[in-house]
């Protein structure tokens, strides 16, 4: 039994559609052209029927599309917002934005959970990503319904601006230096952050740090402060060691 | 010394720009609005100078943006081209298209390598992804120069249609069943593909296979043939076991 069948009982389909249409309009900010896309976006595979074409209906394909759209829009947003940050920073901050925990939290803020059709609400236990996935599927539906530019505007205005504190996301656990030191202690390795001063490739306000593990150079970081350079070197080392 | 300095010696900058402009126009299909974007896209970090803002110039940020754009465009392309394939299939085929080997090969087909500025051509030894990364950076430059729609057209017409054989990519090593059997032999585990016939969730032309490892159910696959259902079950198991 679908969520809408449950709350509306035997009410006619047109009435259910009307309420669902209102809910989607409120989330997206505009009336959907094709409501079926949004019905599919909120359909968990546990309840999807097999269609005549022999294809099980669920929001998983839309989730794939929405995930790609979200990643693209966030990439462009970060690229333009942080013109002087390196690629490693952009990758890291984007991965924090599109990770499961963030998407689940955003799904609740947007009111997605009450729209999702599932066989058993217990499936949404902690750690599960049903609602975050449904949010991605809704993004995919918006993309198909209205195109890339509209979907980008939806993501930036209705999700990023309203519900994400990018500064907080950046400053949460950015301590890559601690991360690498912690790892080294556990692995019984020696970490050294070496300040490089004898280099002519640096600008006057720049610092360079070389990170050595057991006397082997693992990465270099450049930054406008020694601390920043250390963090950049540690970030690169975390990437190499797959600690992120 | 940059590549263009090498081939043109002391020729005036305007002449180098002119030739570079022609090369980019030939790759992209339209004259670039902002040539500097493409100069940056072909600048490897080994040769990038530190700017006055204390920022090392290289194509890495553009590569980040281009990677996101390519993933997005390919996601939409596959989503629409294969309306009856599941998410796992779309994810797998996209990852084959955007993987390092494919991008390096495409970079050569598009004539990217001769444009890339590096300190030492030996850096491009086998296994390295300098040219594939430069291709992604060029895609990022096209996106910034002309916007999403143009960039999508560029990717589909100049890269996908001209240089990718999607059918061949799909049929290369799609044998997930062999993969899982091989893994099980190595790990000394028993794999069983069980045909489910007693299920009323299937359409008349559908098959369902349950994949069991050491008598534990790991995944289910649905398909319009038994073989297809097995492959789908095996693909899901490969995903779960991180064998892809």
Image (tube, coloured by chain):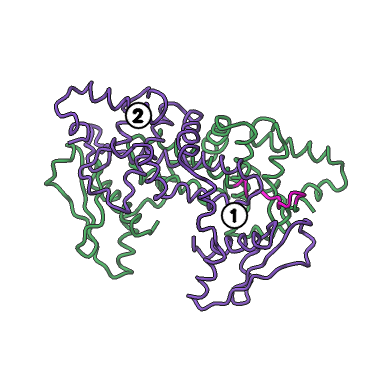
Chain colours: A green, B purple
Taking the magenta stretch, the answer to whether it contains residue A196 is: no
Residue B50 % position (x, y):
22, 37
Using the image, tell me which numbered label, if any, was put on residue B12: none
Residue placed under numbered mark 2 in the picture: B24
**Is residue A200 left or right of B86 when viewed as pictured?**
left
* Between A227 and A74, the one nearer to me in the picture: A74
Residue in view at x 27 percent, y 25 percent = B19
A108, above or below A151, in the image: below
For marks 1 and 2, give the CA distance.
43 Å
Taking the magenta stretch, the answer to whether it contains residue A52 is: yes
Query: Given the image, what chain letter belongs to the residue carrying mark 1?
Result: A
Query: Given the image, what chain letter belongs to the residue carrying mark 2?
Result: B
B43, above or below B217, in the image: above
| Quadrant hosting residue B110 | top left
Residue in view at x 24 percent, y 45 percent = A222
**Is residue B116 left or right of B32 when viewed as pictured?**
left
Disc count in the image? 2
Residue B79 % position (x, y):
60, 43
* Between A229 and B9, the one nearer to me in the picture: B9
Q: Secondary structure at mark 1?
A: loop
* Between A94 and B179, the one nearer to me in the picture: B179
What residue span does the magenta drawing correspond to?
Answer: A51-63
Q: Secondary structure at mark 2?
A: helix
Residue in view at x 68 percent, y 63 percent = B226
Specify few, some or many for label 1: CA neighbours under 10 Å numbering under 14, 14-19, or 20 or more. some
Residue B124 % position (x, y):
27, 48
Contact between labelled residues 2 and 1, with CB atoms less than 8 Å apart: no
Residue in view at x 40 percent, y 36 percent = A79
Using the image, tell me which numbered label, if any, was put on residue A129: 1
Labels 1 and 2 positioned on one and the same chain: no
**Is residue B89 left or right of A50 when viewed as pictured?**
left
């Amino acid at each position: 039994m679908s969520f809408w069948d449950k709350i509306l009982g035997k009410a006619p389909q047109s009435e259910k559609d009307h309420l669902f249409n209102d809910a989607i309009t409120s989330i997206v900010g505009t009336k959907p052209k094709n409501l079926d896309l949004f019905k599919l976006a909120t359909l968990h595979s546990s309840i999807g029927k097999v269609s005549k074409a022999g294809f099980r209906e669920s929001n998983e394909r839309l989730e794939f599309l929405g995930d790609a759209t979200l990643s693209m829009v966030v990439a462009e947003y970060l690229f333009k917002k942080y013109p002087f940050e390196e690629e490693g920073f952009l990758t890291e901050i984007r991965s924090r934005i599109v990770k499961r925990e963030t998407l689940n939290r955003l799904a609740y803020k947007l009111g997605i959970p009450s729209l999702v059709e599932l066989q058993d609400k217990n499936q949404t236990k902690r750690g599960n990503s049903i609602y975050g996935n449904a949010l991605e599927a809704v993004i995919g539906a918006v993309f198909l319904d209205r195109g890339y530019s509209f979907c980008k505007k939806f993501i930036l205005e209705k999700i990023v601006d309203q519900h994400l504190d990018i500064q907080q996301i950046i400053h949460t656990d950015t301590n890559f230096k601690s991360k690498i030191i912690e790892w080294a202690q556990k692995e019984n390795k020696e970490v050294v952050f070496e300040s490089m001063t004898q280099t002519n490739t640096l600008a006057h306000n720049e610092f360079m740090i070389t990170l050595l593990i057991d006397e082997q150079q693992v990465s270099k970081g450049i930054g406008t402060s020694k601390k920043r350079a250390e963090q950049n070197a540690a970030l690169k080392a975390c990437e190499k060691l797959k600690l992120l």
